[in-house]
Amino acid sequence: MAFQIKSIETLINEFRKLPGIGPKSARRIVFYLLKQSKNEIKSFADALIEMKEKVKLCKNCFNLSEDDECFFCKDGSRNKASICIVEKPSDVLVIEATGEYKGLYHVLGGLLSPIENIGPDELKIPKLIERINNLKTSEIIIALNPTVEGDSTATYLSKNLKPLGVKITKLASGLPVGGDIEYADQMTIGRAISGRREI
Amino acid sequence: MAFQIKSIETLINEFRKLPGIGPKSARRIVFYLLKQSKNEIKSFADALIEMKEKVKLCKNCFNLSEDDECFFCKDGSRNKASICIVEKPSDVLVIEATGEYKGLYHVLGGLLSPIENIGPDELKIPKLIERINNLKTSEIIIALNPTVEGDSTATYLSKNLKPLGVKITKLASGLPVGGDIEYADQMTIGRAISGRREI
């Protein structure tokens, strides 16, 4: 539905580029914004620019940060003997939200993928090895998705980090809490059986 | 889930204010934007500011426009003898999309509501009467929602515009195309019966 007003069309198109926003939602958002004050629109635009200008990657763990070192690397109370390896910055959030982990992180920024030409260097693995040596890390927790790429990256990591003398663990794979055995897939049940624990 | 990065939190909060965007969508959008180039973010921010600066209301019909007169008021090929009355600018779009209407519009900007203190002056009705006199309008089409407020506004309009000697019509109310009589509500069926047409 053409609107005949260039600046509105432009903004609708900008919103349509965002994940999960279709043409109708974009239009609804723009009509909402039209009713907002100039100040409110300005603070939205400023927030966009500021986020892009300020946020960079932590020089140690490649998590997002406004400073050279991220919140976790700077925090003296974290357990420096443990590093949790995740794929992307949002995974850090998910693990933090559990409150179960108090160590450091290392954000790979992707998973090994020969097809997409993503090798160990792209995943900051040399820097990880340097950190393990400097911090005298005793445990590495691999928190990657239980997918083909995640599992093969985990295998690669464990093979290359074991010679450094660290204990390497991986998140348990099995039935999700509140899940139903009847509806779980075979692979998940298979892993739940092989990873069974005494109670 | 706190992110510990101020500029990211601020932007997530800005997105959460938008209609239909919850905390998870806002976070997903911000993570998507973090991966975009500085130029892309800038053009998004510029589009916001520009829309707010440029868009105003048409001096005749109160539709949205970047100029003093909107696309429809400026278009010489539109039928100037007919005015379609709608509640809000987005309704203009919906009617245009049908391709059934070639006249002018008048955007009320709301519906009569004594409780919210919205009277005829707030709805630009004096300006509408002025336009009807100047344009020598022959037909007024009332395209308001078939709700209590919409119907009472339509009744008010018809009572006040009839003395001007114009023909006043209202959008037909009845079963939606593709709808099912079994699932239609009593009011809708009632209106479909009273508004029945010979075939």
Image (spheres, coloured by chain):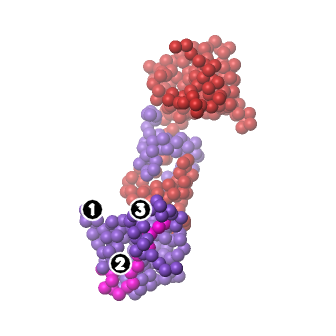
Chain colours: A red, B purple
- Name the residue rendered at 29%, 72% in the picture: B120
> What is the x, y in percent for residue B158?
33, 78
Task: Identify the element where label 1 is drawn.
Answer: loop
| Residue B185, label in figure | 3
What's the amino acid at mark 3?
A: Asp
Tell which of B110 and A123 is nearer to you.
B110
Q: Is residue A116 visible?
A: yes
Residue B79 in the image: x percent, y percent?
Answer: 49, 82
Quadrant location of the N terminus of chain A? bottom right
Frontmost residue, B95 versus B34: B95
Q: Amino acid at mark 1?
A: Glu
| x, y percent for residue B149 | 33, 66
Image location of residue B12, percent across then percent down: 45, 43
How far is the residue under mark 1 from the one under mark 2? 21 Å
Q: Which residue is mark 2?
A: B128
Q: Which residues are magenta?
A: B160-176
Left or right of residue A122: residue B154 = left
Q: Residue B116 shows which numbered tag? A: 1
